[in-house]
Structure formats: structure tokens, C-alpha cells
Amino acid sequence: MDKLLIRGGRRLAGEVTVSGAKNAALPDLCAALLTAQPVLLRNVPRLQDVATTLKLLRNMGAHAERSESRPDEVTIDAGDVGKPEAPYDLVKTMRASILVLGPLLARFGEARVSLPGGCAIGSRPVDQHIKGLQAMGAEITVEHGYILAKARRLKGARITTDMVTVTGTENLLMAASLADGETVLENAAQEPEITDLAEMLIAMGARIEGHGTSKIRVQGVERLHAPANGHRIIPDRIECGTFLCAVAAAGGEVLLKNARADHLDAVVDKLLEAGVKIESGADWIRVAASGRPKAVGFRTSEYPAFPTDMQAQFMALNCIADGTAKVTETIFENRFMHVNELMRLGAHIEVDGHTAVVQGVPQLSGATVMATDLRASASLVIAGLVAEGETVVDRIYHLDRGYDRMEEKLRAVGADIERIQ
Ligand code: UD1
């Protein structure tokens, strides 16, 4: 199993190009199921989760290939899908596989999708996806661990989800695009990835208004087509935020290219509060830091507030900050698994329920630590970059699920980091 070996203490300097967003690529790939025409996606990150999605689409009979000459381009041709189903073996490795449910049901009138299993960061049910599709007239049963869904044609409906759910909103948005009549999604997620998906669907002929707000209106159409010029996936705001925290922790100056500061307002504000220097333009961010940052407390919440997917990385920064910070996680019930590992590196953290109090220390010391989930892995890498001596991060398959060649990008800006067996 691969590990990362990091020798801490190097400042970071140079340029990093941010990849396409994982959480936009996954729904966008699934949206290709909504048409029989071949769909071209650009700026597709090279990630394990993308590879799993391509496998899932091929398993149904779609052709899904990455271009050899342009590795950031993927074409999906769902003209020949014969088996509208997502098997347990694939779904268990990636919860976002549930994103095929809405498009399969809308286009083929049926779907068989395994229920996602337990997940390290909380129970994460999919009841809202099911409730929304039922409101649109689908008959849904759960048998032998599979969701079986049927509908001759989905009907538009007014749907208010009990909580804000990102993939839930995406599933319903895709289903509503091909439904009969108007769907109104209330309490919709407002993440940039929702807007990205909506813009792709609009380019495919969907009639959608209000994306990016909590109320989305969709007038269903009979048929969708491929976007005329393909669709370019937005930059990954979480990868970008992770590099911002890495530079803030390790010190140095880095220019992030293909980066959208307007998707990261809450994180940028907190970094400025910590004393980090940040400048930005339409598609770049320059970050500079020296000395210890100031400790900064925050509370995760739905977009546009501070993202739960940045909680662990910002906590790593607080571990070496000057002062004490309170971090509250409101989205997932069990998302502090990085805390024990950070403490193995010398951090002082106390957890009480959904809140962690981090008392900054002047120096961490390298050790062997275990990655427990995707963003936890990234926080351990950041901690390793500033810890004195060697840090080995084990189980980095979690990191490979969601970061495009992270160690290569860090090495290019001066980090001493290598992948070992
Ligand atoms: C998405 C992101 C993930 C991010 C999360 C929150 C993707 C592929 N993943 O995950 O990186 O951390 O948003 O920003 O985009 N819930 C229910 N019932 C449901 C759906 C959700 O109870 O049917 C709960 C969840 O358990 C959680 C909360 O709602 O507590 C938010 O979850 P949700 O927004 O659905 O997360 P994902 O879409 O899975």
C-alpha cells in the first residue's frame, strides 16, 4: 500500500495549477447518462473517484474514455446503455455513485442502484434523494440492499428537502430536467458545483432557473442533447483551499493558477484573519505567508459558509498557530478522525461533541500517521510539511480518491515529499 514520506520544514515557492473539481466532475459525468449523444467534458481531474465513475458508466454499457492526447478530456457515450444499474462493488468504494439514480430513472424509466454502505465520516443516508424522486412519481422499493426505482415518466413536483443536500439537489436537478412539467426545488444546495451542473444541463437543452440560490425551478423537456462545445468543469475549490492552507502553514509564496477565489470567500476571509497575505484575479490566487499564523476559529456550514471539506486542513493550520481556536463541525457527525492523528504529531486538541478546541503549539514533530478519509489525509500532509523530521502518511488511497497528483504538485513548489511502498 502506498504511503507518503514527508520531511518537514521546507518553505513553498512557485506555481501550482489547480485541477478540475472532483465534486463537479462526478455529477457532470453522470449527467451524460441523460442523453444518447456523446458528451465531451474538459478539465476532468485525474482521480480515483473519476476512474470509479467511468467504470460505473461502462458497467451499464456506456462508452467512457479519457483522451490519450488530451488527458483532461473525457467523452461519455451513453447511447447504448443496456443495464441501468450500479452494483454494490462499485458503490461501496464511492458514495457519490448514488448520482446515477436520478439520470437513469429519468431517461430509462428504471434504475437499480446499491445503497451506499457505511461511511467513515458519518451515516450519510440517501433518504432525501428517494423522497424527492417519489414526489416526482417514482415507485421506489429497497430490496436486498438495492434501491429499485421505476417511473414511466417522472412528473414535475414541488420538493422541499429536510436538510440541504448537495448530491441530493444534483440528483433531483438531473431527474427534473427530463420530467414532465415544472419542478421546484426548495432548500436547494447553492454550492458552485450545483451551478456547474446546472450550466452543463442548460447547454444540453434543459430549462433551469435559480441555480446558485436555494430555490431552483426546472421546466422538464422531452429530450436532452450533448453540449455543443462540450463542458468545462470548474476548478476544484477544495484542492485550491488545501494548497492555500499548506502555504499558510509551511510559509512561502505560491501562485495558484486555474483558481477561483470567488468560490472560496469564507476560507480566504479566515486565512486573512490568520495573517496570511492573499491577492486574487479572475482565475488566479497568490498566497504568501511567513512566521506562525494567528489561531482562527470557524464553524462549518453549507455554501457560502465555511466548507466541511476544508475543516481538517484548516485545523492542521491551527495546530501550529499562535493562540487557541474553536472549530465546530455542523454537517457531519463524525468528522474529527484526523484529531487523534494530528495529536500523534504533537498537536493539542480537545474534542467535545461537534466542537474541537485547538491550542496552537510552536512546533509539531514527525511521526507515522494514518489517513482515515479524504480530507483528513490532506490535513496530515499539511501537518507533515511543517513538522520537524520525517512524517509518514499511511493509507493514502484516500488521498488519491480526491487529489490529482498532490505530491507531484507539492514537490514542484519545493516540498520534500515522496511516495513510497
Ligand atoms: C457532498 C460532497 C462532499 C461534502 C458534502 C457537504 C460530493 C460528491 N460530495 O456530499 O464532499 O462534504 O457534500 O458539503 O459532492 N443527508 C441526509 N439524507 C440525505 C442526504 C443527506 O440525512 O438524503 C445528510 C447527510 O448525512 C449530511 C448532510 O445531510 O449530514 C449533508 O450531506 P450532503 O450534502 O448530502 O453530502 P453529500 O452530497 O453526500
Image: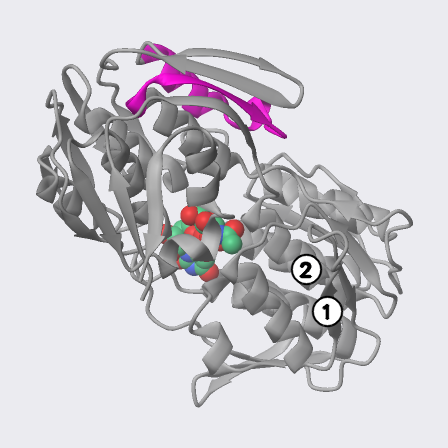
Instruction: Give me the C-alpha separation between circle 1 and circle 2.
Output: 9 Å
Q: Determine if residue 330 is in view.
A: no
Residue 34 is drawn in which quadrant?
bottom right
The 10 Å Cα crowd at callout 1, few under 14, some 14 to 19, many 20 or more, is: many
Which residues lie in the magenta part? 249-273
> Looking at the image, which is closer to me, 110 or 20?
20
Please state, as top left, top right, bottom left or bottom right, where the C terminus lies in the image: bottom left
Was residue 62 drawn as part of the magenta stretch in this picture? no
Q: Which residue is mark 2?
A: 29
Tag 1: residue type? Answer: Ala
Determine if the C-beta at disc 1 is less than 8 A from ligand 1: no
Q: Is the residue 312 above or below the residue 112 in the image?
A: above
Q: Determine if residue 241 is in view.
A: yes
> Looking at the image, which is closer to me, 419 or 187?
419
Determine if the C-beta at disc 2 is less than 8 A from ligand 1: no
Residue 179 picture location, percent across and down: 78, 64
Determine whether, in the image, residue 347 is placed left or right of residue 32.
left
Taking the spot 28% from the left edge, 33% from the top edge, the residue there is: 385
Q: Which residue is mark 1?
A: 64
